[in-house]
Amino acid sequence: MPGPPMGTIMMADDGSVLVTLRRLNWAIVVVTATLVILAAMFLAVLVSTAHFHDAAPPPPAPMGNCQPFCSAAH
């Protein structure tokens, strides 16, 4: 029978505590940390270049005459 799953705490017969820990895959940690930092940097640049206090641009004016394209508009 194999041993206990990784990350479990067992009590030995003499009363001592045995702890088995999972091995950490550092490649996953590095990739995850890099993605989190890049996402934070992207959001910082996105927010820093936004113009929150500018007035909304006016809507485009409607065209008055559709002369060359009137048949396509109807």
Image: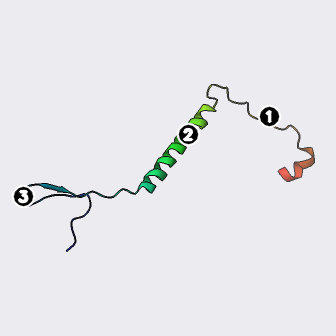
- Residue at the image point whose x is 73% and y is 30% from the top: 58
Mark 2–mark 1 distance (CA, rounded to whole Å)? 39 Å
The residue beneath circle 3 is: 14
Q: Position of residue 47 (x, y in %)?
A: 58, 34
Q: Residues within 10 Å of mark 1 (few under 14, many from 20)?
A: few
Query: Residue 4, which numbered label?
Result: none
Label 2 crowding class (10 Å Cα cut-off): few <14, some 14-19, many 20+? Answer: few
- Secondary structure category for the residue under label 1: loop
**What is the three-letter code of the residue carrying label 2?**
Met
Pick whichever of labels 3 and 1 is earlier in the sequence.
3
Q: Is residue 42 left or right of residue 21?
A: right
- Residue at image position (46%, 51%) is 30
Percent x, y of residue 73? 83, 50
Q: Earlier in the sequence, mark 3 or mark 2?
A: 3
Q: Is 48 located above or below residue 30 in the figure?
A: above
State left or right for residue 49 relative to residue 29.
right
Q: Closer to the N terminus: mark 2 or mark 1?
A: 2
Q: Which residue is mark 2?
A: 41
Q: Amino acid at mark 3?
A: Asp
- The reply to whether dot 3 and dot 1 touch (C-beta < 8 Å) is no
